[in-house]
Amino acid sequence: MKRIFSHLRPLKWRIGAAAILMTLSSLGQLLLPALMSAVVDEGIYARDFSAILKLCGLMFLVALCSLGVTIWGRKLSAQVVSGFSSGLRESIFKKVMGMSHESFGKMDTGSLVTRSTQDVGTVSWVANMLSSGIISIPAMFLGGVILSFQVDAVLASVVLCAVPFVGLVVFLIGRRVAPLWELSDAYIDKQNEMIRQRLRGIRVIRAFRREPDEHEKIADATRVMADNIINANVSMQSINPIASFCLNAAAVVILYLSARRMESGVSAATGGDILALIQYVAYIMNGVLAGSFAIVMVPHAAVACRRILQVLDLPEDRGEEGRSSSLKGGITLDHVSFCFEGSSEPALRDVTMDIQPGQRVAVIGSTGSGKSTLIQLLLGFRPCTQGQILFDGIPAGELSGSSLRSQISSVLQKTAIYAGTIGENVSMGCPGTTEADIWNALDIAQMREFVESLPDGLNHKIELSGSNLSGGQRQRLAIARALNKEAAIYIFDDSFSALDFLTESKLRARLSQELKGRTQIVVTQRVTTAMYCDCIFVLDNGCLVDQGRHEDLLERCQVYREIYTSQTGGDTL
């Protein structure tokens, strides 16, 4: 928890000021019972109306000052909570943006969302308690105890007898709710992830009429989550009635004993003192309840802190580690192997390639042959298990991640389109680009005619994930975004798959003109895409089985020939 609450250091002066103001408010409230006692004893009993007015006016002034101080303190406390929660969420967001590829596999999206929202909210409650109650709650409790002892030590002792019992109840409840909160938070993560996956696959679910089954899966997770949350909240809320019963029972006993002691003359307490004592009992009860609730919430906050730290402790991408270098586009893979964590078989095995600057190469293979894994290694998303990748003779491990990716422009297999305008999506890879450059990129990507037909043109709004675009339009928009960025190396990872053959042919012709002298790596399953490249690398089950030009591979490579025959029927293209 210490690391989490280090975010409060910039706010320490506001925390101190809020704590002092809330303490002054508590002291003002503790002064009111003494003034009320004086009203009864010096005003009502003495039938002195002027004394009543004077003391009531003083009470009103104290209450007004206490109110003003409370409002000021609450405002500072709200600023502390807001600053703390926003700073913590910013740290989580920065961590997520810098997480390594392996880290994303360890924690699903639903869990990350819950930890950055609900868990931060839980921890923020502790920040609120630190700023508004860390001094005022003990001050209210201790002040009530001290002042009640000044009135009558014997009667005040009755209240203290109830406090240990309440403390025992709080301790037992705190031990019970901690595992309940941890389990409920885990099921909230599970429920969020299930809902996210179902929303993404809603068309498939409806197509196969699986709505009832999916509803049942969500309902099961919801029931477990709800049961744990209900049990935890019922346990926590049981503190209030138990503590109230104990302390109110103590107040009844005080009234009974005070009457007997006043009748017998043992106690010198007056009616006003007894009235003040009852008010002090109420303050003690409020302090006990607030403190009890804080103690019970600590296990929940501890669970939230652990969950947030699990995110902050995930390995980061290498980012700025390494040196910067201007690349020409030469790439060498020297006996590269890669194996996913937990997998017994490598995804890539002893792959050796040599790509010259300005060369256009294709990587072809069947599904699961390791093509996209190879691209992840080239982009530095994952480190090689064995061997090394060199860019212009420089080992990739010596280059910083930002330097490497700034000189590579890529279109990944899973097209990412963001909510906004067409112009914003195209210029994303190159901020500050001109409108002419955007139109040029759209023209090369065979997207210009479509955009010009829209009433808003470049300002046409795109919905989340590009849901108002077709698959081919999303792919061409992603290609335009990559082309708008000046780079030494361009990677197209199966990014022509949604295009018809005529559009792809036009696009290939434009790419050959516009990217002449730049290294192009085209990952594809289509022979018609690969056959026009300078060199074709054939992958099969993670191994590089052959490389060369289209005509040569047809003669000597069985894997390539099988792909060619399956797509063309053996006819000459």
Image (cartoon, rainbow, N blue to C red):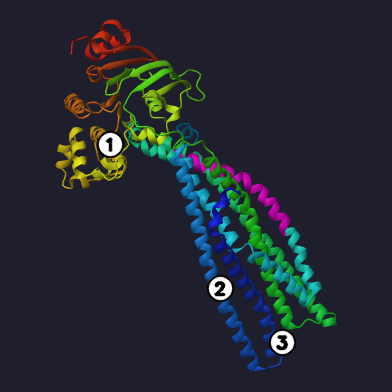
Q: Is residue 558 left or right of residue 64?
A: left
Amino acid carrying mark 1 in the image: Lys
Q: Is residue 14 left or right of residue 556?
A: right
Residue that label 3 marks: 41
Q: Main secondary structure of the magenta part?
A: helix
* Placement of the C terminus among the 4 image quadrants: top left
State which mark lies toward you, 3 or 1: 1
Sequence order check, earlier mark of 1 and 2: 2
Q: Residue at x 16, y 25 (%)?
A: 502
State which mark lies toward you, 2 or 3: 2
Q: Does the stretch in magenta take in 169?
A: yes
Q: Taking 439 as reference, is 295 above or below it?
A: below
SS type, badge 1: loop
Write down the quadrant of residue 563 in the picture.
Answer: top left
Sequence order check, earlier mark of 3 and 1: 3
* Front position in the image: 358 or 372: 358
SS type, badge 2: helix
Q: Which circle marks residue 69 in the picture? A: 2
SS type, badge 3: helix
Q: Residue at x 40, y 34 (%)?
A: 324
Q: Is residue 473 left or right of residue 310?
A: left
Q: Residue furthest top?
A: 556
| Residue at mark 1 to residue at mark 2: CA–CA distance | 57 Å
Q: Which circle marks residue 485 in the picture? A: 1
Which region of the structure is painted magenta? 166-193
Q: Residue at x 35, y 22 (%)?
A: 331
User: Is residue 334 visible from the viewing direction of this image?
Assistant: yes
Amino acid carrying mark 2 in the image: Val
| Residue at mark 3 to residue at mark 1: CA–CA distance | 85 Å
Q: Residue at x 65, y 73 (%)?
A: 27
* Front position in the image: 71 or 439: 439
